[in-house]
Every structure is written in C-alpha cells, then in structure tokens.
Amino acid sequence: MKRFYLFGFLLLMAFDTLSQISFKYAGDSALPVAASIGWLTRVFSQPWVYGAVVGYVGAFFTWMALLKHAPIGPAFAASHLEVVSVMLLSVWLFDEHLTLPRVLGAIAIVAGIVCLGLAESREHVAEPADA
Amino acid sequence: MLPAHGSISALVACLWVFNVLLDTGGQLAFKAAAGHPEAGDGLARWKHMAARPWLWLGIGCYLFEFLVWIAFLSLLPLSEGVLLGSINIVAIMVAGRFLFGEKLTRMRVAGILLVTLGVAIVGLAG
C-alpha cells in the first residue's frame, strides 16, 4: 500500500510539473503579452497550452484517487512540492540559474509546505478523539 | 515592441496579484458550492450546484486564472514564477480562516510564515 501512495504522489508531481513547463513554453511562444485577441490566438494555436490542460486533468484525477486512500497531510505536501521539480527542470530546459535568493526562498517554502502537511496530518489523526 | 523594464515589472506584479485573487476566489467559490447543507447527494447535488452561481463563479475564476498564469510566466523565469505562485497556499488558508472560521493551529501559522518568507526572499531579490 505504501508503494501505491508513493507512486500516486510522484504521479501527481509529474502532472503538476508537466503543467507548469507547458505553461512556460505556451507563454513564451505567445509573447508579447497583450490583452488582445491576437495574444489569445497565439496562446491557443500552439500545442503547449494543451499539454498544460493534460497536466491539469491528470493532476485532478490523481488527486481525487489519492484523497480516497492516502493520508491528507502527505497528499497536501505532494500536491505543492512540484516547485522543486519545476525549479530543477527549468535549469536544464530554460537555462535558468539557481540563484541564492531562489534556493533560500525554495527552502523556506518547502519547509512551510511540510509544516502545513504536518498540521493536516495531526488534525486528522486527532479527529476521532474529539468526536 | 517590449515596454521599458519598469513597466514590465509593474505588469508582472499586477498579474501576480490577479492570480492570487482569482485562485483564492475560485477555491472559495467551489467551497461555497460544495458545502451547501441542503444540497442532497449524487445527481441532485450536482443539479443543486448547477442552478446556483457559486460553481460557475469558481469555473470562471479558474478559466481566467489559466490565462493570467500563462501571461505571468512568460514575463519572468519559470523557477521564480512557481516560487512566487506559492503565495496562493497562504492566501487560501487566511481566507478560509476569515470566511469559514477554519482553525489556524500553531503548526499552520508556522507553515504560513515560512511560505510567506520564501516568497518575500524571491520577490524582493527578483
């Protein structure tokens, strides 16, 4: 069962990562940004925007399946930890740099997400005692 | 074609704020749609939700957010963009506290402060 959760969390992260990378490719190829039909046409006339949709739909169904079985705390954390995978991939795909502020910011954010995940876990463990 | 650097960062800030508002608004609308006590079960519940504005408001927010997020990410590095976007987690928890009276335990407050700190570090440097 543990292996099932782990696979589910990784799948959720993979779908979220696919979405973010697709969003970036879609946005980059639709530049310059403008509140216009022209920009919307540029966004929807290349395949990346549909990659983002696939990632969203996949993440939605994975999340729903996970929530049925997996503990909520780790599921919550897993649904937000794609920041790490996206950061690492953007070094490779977009030649971005892991600057010091980004690394420090990411460490604080991940620590915060872990706290929030732990908070969820505690609450749901504590619930039967309250009832 | 590109505006001067100053107006780009103003546009980025605007899109960032819009993204937070739309994401939080969408989540709260879905919460309001799903949490209605007289809604019933199964198909009746879906019919009940479809006849009220909350579900549609939520969908509208999400569609608009989709476009705002694409525009936002095209104006800055992806690694910076996703980190700045983490503020949505904080906004939703704070809104849930005020609108639905959800508890902010010490662990949650610690999480909220850490995420906010991380976003501030990235935002102030970038």
Image (cartoon, rainbow, N blue to C red):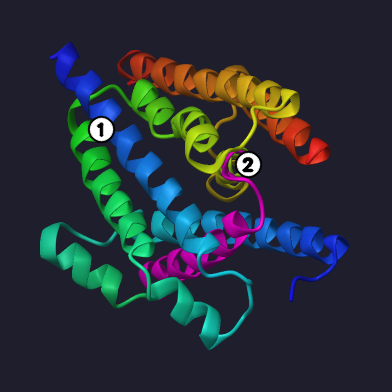
Image quarter where the C terminus of chain A lies is top left
- Write down the chain letter for disc 2: B
Quadrant in the picture for residue B13: bottom right
Identified by mark 1, the residue type is: Leu
Amino acid, disc 2: Ile
**Residue found at x 84% / y 60%:** B5
Q: Main secondary structure of the magenta part?
A: helix
Q: Is residue B95 above or below residue A14?
A: below
Tag shown at residue A11: 1
Would residue B26 be found to the left or right of residue B1 on screen?
left
Q: Is residue A98 above or below residue B37?
A: above
Q: Is residue A91 left or right of residue B63?
A: right
Q: Is residue B3 left or right of residue B12?
A: right
Q: Nearer the viewer, residue B1 or A78?
A: B1
In percent of the image, x 29 and y 22: which residue is there?
A71
Q: Which residue is mark 2?
A: B87
Q: Which residues are magenta?
A: B53-82
Q: Quadrant of the N terminus of chain A?
A: top left
